[in-house]
Image: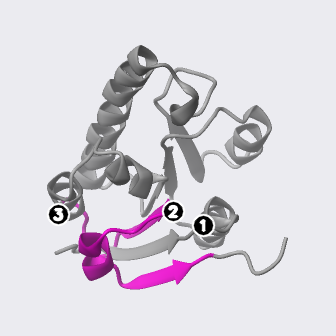
């Protein structure tokens, strides 16, 4: 399936994005270029502005226009954001096809699949664009069987005590 290497951080616990960003910093420190594309999240300026200070090695892209998270939006606002997220998927596919980065993190992509915004076929087509030495990292709560099959490493994040 995927020509590149795919890591997945999933589960109901907190820290999936943090783990992915940690991997981004690790790879950037090795001279690799990293792109992060965020989906479904509310805009958190302090988080994004910190990571943006790591440019040009790590670049963050967020195609959603609204400040609120996807689930907090009205149905009409959701429809608009779905189009924006589909544009983000096209962007990610183009990035892989052109080899613009060494590491591509699709933050909350599993939720995009869970909500039916992208199908397993859409993600499969995206993965096919990855070169053999591209590192892909997916995050999200629920992992579907297809992604489980495609992944090289899956990390389940859960809360034992809060």
* Circles 1, 2 touching at the beta carbon (< 8 Å): yes
Residue 66 drawn above or below residue 70:
above
Alpha-carbon neighbours of circle 2 within 10 Å: few (<14), some, or many (≥20)? many
Which mark is in front, 1 or 3?
1
Marks 1 and 2, the one that precedes in the sequence: 1
Label 1 crowd bin: few (<14), some (14–19), many (20+), radius 10 Å: few
Q: Residue at x 58, y 71 (%)?
A: 27
Which residue is tagged 2?
141
104 left or right of 2?
right
Say which element carries label 3: helix
Between the residue at mark 2 and the residue at mark 3, the CA separation in whole angstroms equals 23 Å
Q: Residue at x 52, y 71 (%)?
A: 9
Q: Quadrant of the N terminus?
A: bottom left
Q: Of tags 2 and 3, which is closer to the observer?
A: 2
Picture coordinates of residue 32, whole percent (x, y): 52, 65
C-alpha gap between disc 1 and disc 2: 5 Å
Helix, strand or loop at disc 2? loop
What residue is disc 1 on? 12
Give the percent coordinates (x, y) of residue 74: 49, 19
Magenta stretch: includes residue 49 = no
* Range shown magenta: 129-157
Circle nearer the N terminus (2, 3): 3
Farthest residue, direction right? 162
Q: Position of residue 106 (x, y in %)?
A: 44, 54
Counting other residues with Cα less than 10 Å from the Cα at mark 3, is it few (<14), some (14-19), or many (20 or more)?
Answer: some
What separation in Å lies between label 1 and label 3 (alpha carbons)? 28 Å
* Marking on residue 128: 3
Name the image quarter holding residue 42: top right
Rendering quarter of residue 153:
bottom left
Q: Residue at coordinates 19% horizontally, 51% vertically from top-left?
A: 122
Total marks in image: 3
């Amino acid at each position: 399936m995927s020509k590149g290497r795919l890591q997945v951080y999933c589960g109901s616990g907190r820290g999936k994005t943090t783990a992915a960003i940690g991997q981004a910093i690790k790879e950037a420190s090795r001279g690799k270029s990293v792109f992060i594309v965020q989906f479904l999240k509310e805009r958190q300026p302090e988080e994004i502005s910190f990571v943006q200070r790591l440019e040009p090695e790590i670049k963050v892209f967020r195609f959603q226009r609204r400040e609120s998270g996807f689930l907090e939006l009205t149905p009409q606002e959701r429809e608009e954001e779905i189009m924006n997220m589909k544009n983000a998927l096209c962007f990610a596919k183009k990035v892989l096809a052109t080899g613009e980065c060494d590491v591509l993190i699709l933050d909350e992509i599993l939720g995009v699949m869970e909500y039916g915004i992208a199908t397993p076929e859409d993600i499969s087509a995206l993965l096919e664009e990855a070169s053999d030495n591209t590192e892909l990292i997916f995050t999200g709560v629920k992992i579907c069987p297809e992604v489980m099959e495609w992944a090289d490493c899956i990390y389940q994040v859960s809360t034992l005590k809060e």
